[in-house]
Amino acid sequence: MGTQLRVTQVDPRDRDALRAWYVPSRAAFLEAAPTEEDLRERGRELADHRLSAVHDTVAGEDRVVATLRTFDSELTVPGSGPVSVDAVSTATVLPTHRRRGLLTRLLTADLDRARHAGHAFAALVAAEAPIYGRFGFGAATRATSLVVDNSRVRFRPDAPAATGSLEFVPAGRTAELAAVHDRTRRHRPGGLLRDEVWWEAAGRRGEGRWLGPRGHVVLHRDEHGVADGYVAYDVTDDAVGRVPGGTAHVRDLAATGPAAYRSLWEFLTSIDLVRTTRAGNRPVDELLPHLLQDPRAVQTGPVDDLLWLRALDVPGALAARRYLGCGTLVLKVVDPLGLADATVRLHVAAQRCGADGWVCAEVTTTDAEPDVVLPVGELSSLLLGGTSAVALHAAGRLDCTASAAFALATLVVTPEQPWCPTWF
Ligand SMILES: CC(C)(COP(=O)(O)OP(=O)(O)OC[C@H]1O[C@@H](n2cnc3c(N)ncnc32)[C@H](O)[C@@H]1OP(=O)(O)O)[C@@H](O)C(=O)NCCC(=O)NCCS
């Protein structure tokens, strides 16, 4: 069998090659085979992406049995804004070919390529948590879901006032949404670039898309008419008999400030015939409960990992972000794939503090005795500030003293929880 397997790069503009690549990947994700329209749209969306395929000869025919897709993107890291990242997606192996090392073959080749291309990070959304630790990834952002009982929503008198105006946005008009998203994603760690092609796809509403056929987008403008927030939501009519019981399902909500945020939630929770507002993939430190007289109007949970990060260049990854704490630690980072092993001195000096309070670190490789020995996946899950070094130490995943774990936790802490609102 091994002699028949071969790896190719697929040109997304070649419709037949794309079909051969896309059909097994949809099957592995338990999805229906793509239509010709899907292929036309995907060909355009994936034009700049790298598509790898493993082919096998099955019953005399050449077939794709494993896929991987990667593309260059931008990830927001604490205190510094966006940095380049190798975004990894569509890792699939047909059930007939699983557990023979095909994912390992495609992914390790791509991580090696990305490291040589100068990326300090790779990132992905894991379908299952046990898959990617062995490849040096660690869970770096988490997300939760909200269920809001609209009848119990009363904003506190000290909540930011709902100012500005709201308007419905027709399908396909996405330029202002893209501008709002771009401002918000640069601010919070974990944010990911959405390019023009992403927004073009979001402009088409329908089943399985960003927004369904019953979906709406509402834009918020500040008092000067500048777009500063939006919500995209679907609705379902869950009336019992003649008692209204509609639900609004928030697919995407972004606001550059608290006034726009409050206005959008006030709007959502007061739509006639809608009794419940649901929102998935929201930050774990969502603001909404803090604005309400009865915070329990918002039921939160479960909390799940979303973005998995992988440092490909340890000094580069540590230097890419900035820090709020100060101190010096020697970290010995061990890489199961041997791509990024390094011992580094991470030095954050209070006097290098910028006007915004964030501090650039000095990161140098060293032979000094390490304060903390840790796998690259554990380092990667700490880098955005969403994982506690104290908890990882208690779990036996950092080799260090309790005080070194505490010092590391204090160094990497961030004021907001990292959050990635963009699936890929
Ligand atoms: C997940 C998937 C890509 C793995 O592909 P694969 O070719 O079977 O993986 P490999 O053979 O390279 O496995 C490498 C190692 O990871 C382990 N592994 C792979 N998938 C795993 C899973 N879902 N859960 C736990 N361990 C897993 C293997 O057991 C193997 O461990 P070993 O080295 O100790 O033997 C494949 O099963 C698949 O397509 N699943 C459905 C779609 C999916 O979930 N894709 C992931 C998208 S993020």
Image (cartoon, helix red, strand yellow):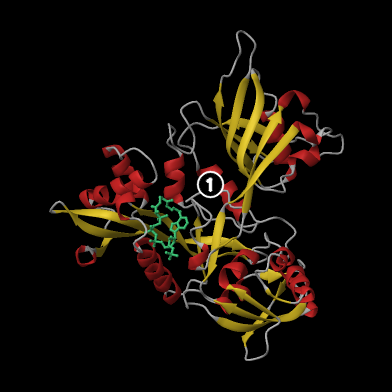
Question: Which picture quadrant has residue 376?
Answer: bottom right
Quarter of the rendering occupied by the N terminus: bottom left
Give percent across and percent down for residue 144.
Answer: 64, 44
Pick the front one: 85 or 403: 403
Up-down relation of residue 423 to residue 121 (above or below)? above
Give percent across and percent down for residue 66.
Answer: 32, 56
421 on left or right of 267: left
Q: Which residue is mark 1?
A: 178
Instruction: Tell me which residue sits at (77%, 78%) in the image.
Output: 327
Give percent across and percent down for residue 281.
Answer: 60, 44
Farthest residue in the top direction? Answer: 242
Please, what secondary structure does the residue beneath circle 1 have? helix
Q: Are there few (<14), some (14-19), or many (20+) residues within 10 Å of tag 1?
A: some
Farthest residue in the bottom direction? Answer: 367
Pick the front one: 197 or 147: 147
Farthest residue in the left direction? Answer: 60
